[in-house]
Amino acid sequence: MGLIRSMRSRSQRVVQEQEAAECVGVVVGDSMRQSCWANMPQELLREVLLRIEASEDTWPPRKSVVSCAGVCRSWRHITKDIVKTPELSSKITFPISVKQPGPRENLLRCFIKRNRSTQTYYLFLSLTSTLAEDGKFLLAARKCRRPTCTDYIISLDADDMSKGSNSYVGKLRSNFLGTKFTIYDSQLPHTGAKIMKSRSTRLVNLKQVSPKVPTGNYPVAHISYELNVLGSRGPRRMHCVMDSIPATAIEPGGVAPTQTEFSLNNIDMFPSFPFFRSKSNRAENSMSGPLVDQKDGMLVLKNKAPRWHEQLQCWCLNFHGRVTIASVKNFQLVASAENGPAGPEHDKIILQFGKVGKDLFTMDYRYPISAFQAFAICLSSFDTKIACE
């Protein structure tokens, strides 16, 4: 135990020293870092890192695992091999985890805080059993009104929610009526995706040149709200088509594409954590899992139909204690049986969202969608729907 504590403190100290050196313009080369820390016996290093990963399973102590990944190249490779995706571990460790599918067996509990004055939204990972008291920051979004649509810019940085930032990870765009939405990812969700033209892209010598900041807009999902004939008294009806996830992903043994690293455009925001660096700039290398084949069909999510409660005189859903305030925004999404008969997998709640305070909402999600996709879907519920209410 003493060795583990010593290694943990050393890994954090190395990262702090590296950050300090970079702040004053001193370049710390890989060779120097390698010579200091890479000479440990691989078996011993793996055993130490395994124990740290197992013992620091919650935030904020889990930052020790992140520190270990930033020590040197050999530490990075072993940590990358040890730390599992949220699908397998039910843990969010690195920033890339928000782009990876959630756990298969349970819902990952999160909550969203809304700031009405600044029109910003913040996603946190729940750290306690209480509804929304303490959390680890994951994502932030800022609402931008335009003449014909509304954009929600989604960022990894709570203080920089601009599309020109290296922390930009995607956006949600609505139509004028607020009934149809498109979720865009800043990087390629799969090799068959189509990139949307961006104002930041320019032509130089008849060749398209993209600037350093991430400018890709890849549609990964489409959300639509149907007309509510009951007005504000009735629940909203949602329909989500996940363009990058095959319908077979919810079946036993089904697999959804999983991003394993950020594109080179985003890497600059992690200067002290080379865990995210890659020598290849091919977007295909940052993906694992199958690609969506149009023949197989895309995953379609629909809101679970609520039941009318005679005594309460309202529409009700069972959120198992995770929602405490009735709201038209509350919803639960399940897989829609678009391509065949419904099975047990179509009864599982993939995403649920509900109100627990004036500006506080819970968000719980599971495989095959990611925290980023779930957050974007929930943001669509905040937008005013002229035609639906």
Image (spheres, helix red, strand yellow):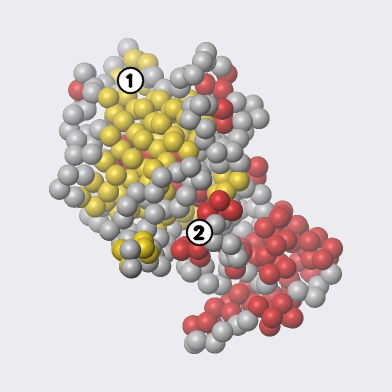
Which image quadrant: the C terminus? Answer: top left
The image shows residue 45 at horizontal and vertical percentages of 79, 66
**Quarter of the figure with residue 157:** bottom left
Residue indicated by mark 1? 315
| Amino acid at the residue labelled 2 | Ser
- Residue appearing at x 57%, y 18% in the figure: 344
- Residue appearing at x 18%, y 29% in the figure: 387
Residue 139 appears in the rendering:
no
The image shows residue 71 at horizontal and vertical percentages of 66, 72
Residue indicated by mark 2? 263
- Residue appearing at x 63%, y 81% in the figure: 29
| Amino acid at the residue labelled 1 | Trp
Q: Nearer the viewer, residue 212 or 305?
A: 212
* Left or right: 261, with 48 as reference point: left
For the residue labelled by badge 1, is the local secondary structure a helix, a strand or a loop? Answer: strand
Q: From the viewer's perspective, is residue 210 above or below residue 374?
A: below
* Left or right: 208, with 33 as reference point: left
Q: Nearer the viewer, residue 353 or 21?
A: 21
Which image quadrant: the N terminus? Answer: bottom right
For the residue labelled by badge 2, is the local secondary structure a helix, a strand or a loop? Answer: loop
Q: Nearer the viewer, residue 288 or 112?
A: 288
Q: Residues within 10 Å of mark 1 (few under 14, many from 20)?
A: some
The image shows residue 272 at horizontal and vertical percentages of 56, 72
Residue 287 appears in the rendering:
yes
Between the residue at mark 2 and the residue at mark 1, the CA separation in whole angstroms equals: 44 Å
Q: From the viewer's perspective, is residue 381 above or below residue 159?
A: above
